[in-house]
Amino acid sequence: MHRVVIADDHEIVRKGLAETLRSLGDCEIAGEACDGLETIAMAKALEPHLLLLDAAMPYARGIEVFSEIKRWNPKIMVAVVTGFTSAATLAQWLDAGVDGLFLKSCEELELRKGLRTILSGGQYICEASARILEQRPEAIQLTGREREVLALITNGLRNVEIGERLCISAKTVEKHRTSLMAKVGVQSLPALLTFALREGLLDEHRQL
């Protein structure tokens, strides 16, 4: 039997994944975790064959959880199940070396097929993720300061407040905001926030 740990901060997702795993016939649910720190502790204590990992949970970023678990025990297979559809974010997981990559929107039949492939020692990237990666546009390059300003904008801060945080003038903040919109190709704050969400630039605990 393959021991599996499921890590997701949404109970309904954990239950759905557990049902799919049980349907395979040779998997047992060793444990369920609802945040990043609990996931790391559970993986170390239970030493599962496979970890199904949500890309964004409270207390520890998904990529940090993955890195810590792989550093501690490289033999644990990790498949990411995510709601992110950003090509940049998906590519980051592939570059990190995950054993599987699934979108939460993928069909159960494909999930079972992918899990079988992973448990047999292969790597599986769901079809929807593969299409997104194939159509990946040229990456938009933001400066470090632009990223700082964008992060504070998404937290609802005004130009004056951002300026106080970064020790720059409100006028300079406005210039960065204008530059961000031009690079992204949007003309409104909601569109800029949509871009930040899609590209995984918001705080992860606020995402899917």
Image (spheres, grey):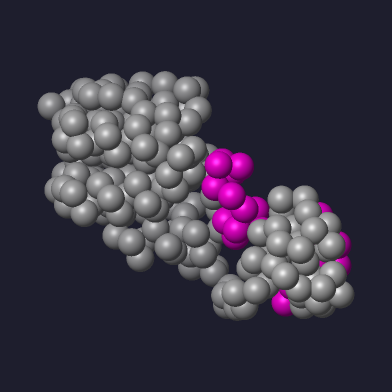
Q: Is residue 111 above or below residue 17?
A: below
Q: In this orientation, which residue lies closer to the viewer: 156 or 4?
A: 156
Task: Give the residue displayed 18% in from the left and 49% down from the top.
Answer: 72
Q: Position of residue 36 (x, y in %)?
A: 40, 39
- Where residue 208 sits, quadrant-wise, is top right
Residue 102 located left or right of residue 79: right
Q: Quadrant of the N terminus?
A: top left
Residue 194 located left or right of residue 77: right
**In the rendered structure, which segment of residues is drawn in magenta?**
180-208
Task: Give the residue displayed 49% in from the left and 59% down from the top.
Answer: 89
Task: Give the residue displayed 28% in from the left and 24% down from the top.
Answer: 31
Q: Does any portion of residue 113 appear in the rendered image?
A: no
Q: Position of residue 35 (x, y in %)?
A: 42, 34
Task: Give the residue displayed 42% in from the left and 21% down from the top.
Answer: 15
Number of marks in the rendered image: 0
Tell me, yes or no, whether the highlighted magenta stretch contains residue 202: yes
Residue 59 located left or right of residue 159: left
Prevailing secondary structure class for the magenta stretch in the rendered image: helix
Residue 180 located left or right of residue 200: right
Q: Is residue 57 above or below residue 128?
A: above
Q: Is residue 179 above or below residue 186?
A: below
Q: Position of residue 100 (x, y in %)?
A: 32, 49
Tell me, yes or no, whether the highlighted magenta stretch contains residue 205: yes
- Where residue 144 sits, quadrant-wise, is bottom right
Q: Does any portion of residue 85 appear in the rendered image?
A: yes
Q: In this orientation, which residue lies closer to the viewer: 156 or 186?
A: 156
